[in-house]
Amino acid sequence: MILHCTKKLYALLPEQAKERAPVVPSIGLQSEWNNWHANVITVQRKQCLIAVHDATRFALFIPGLLKKDWANLDWHFEDVLINTLLKSDIAHELIEVAAANLKPLAFDTTYNRSVQGTMNQISQEIDYDLYYNWPSIKDISPYRYSANLSHRPCNTKDHKNCFWPDKRMAELLTKLAGYEHRTGAYFQ
C-alpha cells in the first residue's frame, strides 16, 4: 500500500520507512485499493494523521502521534483502517478481504490535487468539529471519528453526483473479493 505524503508528513517519517520503494500495480483493482494520500495536521498541539483513499475518498484520522509512532505507522494505519471499517457497518466478509489485502506501507511525495482538496476539506471539518464539539482530542475514538468522516456526501470533478465514501469503499471491497475469488486468491 502506498501513502502519497505531503512534504510535511514525509519529513517526519524515519529514514528506513522512506527507503521502502513503492511497488504498486499501475492499473486494476489492486492499484485502486493500494493508493492513499496522507497529511499531518496539528490539532490541540497534537500531531494527527489524515489519510484519504484515492478512489473512494474513505478517510482515516489517527490522532496524537508521537515521534516513536512514526516508525510504527504500518500498525497504526492498519489498526485504524480495519476498526473504522467495522464502525462503518461494512460486512465482516469484506473486512476480511481488506485485511487479506493489506501490504506494508510505502511512501512517496507524488500527489493528486483532487484528493488533496478532499484532505483539506476534511482537515477543516476536523478543526471545526474539535474546536466546537470536543473539549479534548483525547476524548474521541479514532475509529468512530473516522467512520463519521467517511459517512458524508462527497463530490469530485470526475463525478457529477455526490457519493458516500463508506459505501464506495464497500463497493470496492466487493469488487476486490470477486476478483480474488476468480483468481483463486480469496482468503489466502
Image: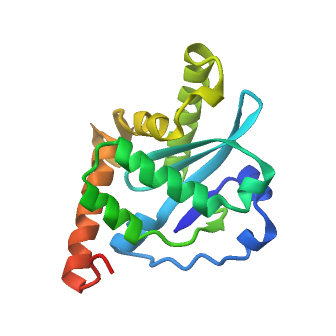
Q: Which residue is drawn at 30% across and 76% down?
A: 187
Of residues 108 and 157, which is closer to you in this image? 108
Q: Which residue is drawn at 79% across and 64% down?
A: 14
Q: Residue at x 72, y 54 (%)?
A: 69
Quadrant of the image containing the C terminus: bottom left
Q: In this view, does 70 lie to the left or right of 123?
A: right
Q: Position of residue 68 (x, y in %)?
A: 78, 55
Answer whether residue 57 is visible to the viewer in this image. no
Task: Please determine whether, in this image, residue 180 is positioned above or below residue 97.
Answer: below
| Residue 98 placement: quadrant | bottom left
Q: Which residue is drawn at 72% across and 27% down?
A: 44
| Residue 148 placement: quadrant | top left
Q: Position of residue 108 (x, y in %)?
A: 65, 66
Q: Where is residue 130 in the image (x, y as percent from the top left)?
A: 59, 22
Of residues 17 and 39, which is closer to you in this image? 17
Task: Please determine whether, in this image, residue 175 is positioned above or below residue 179.
Answer: above
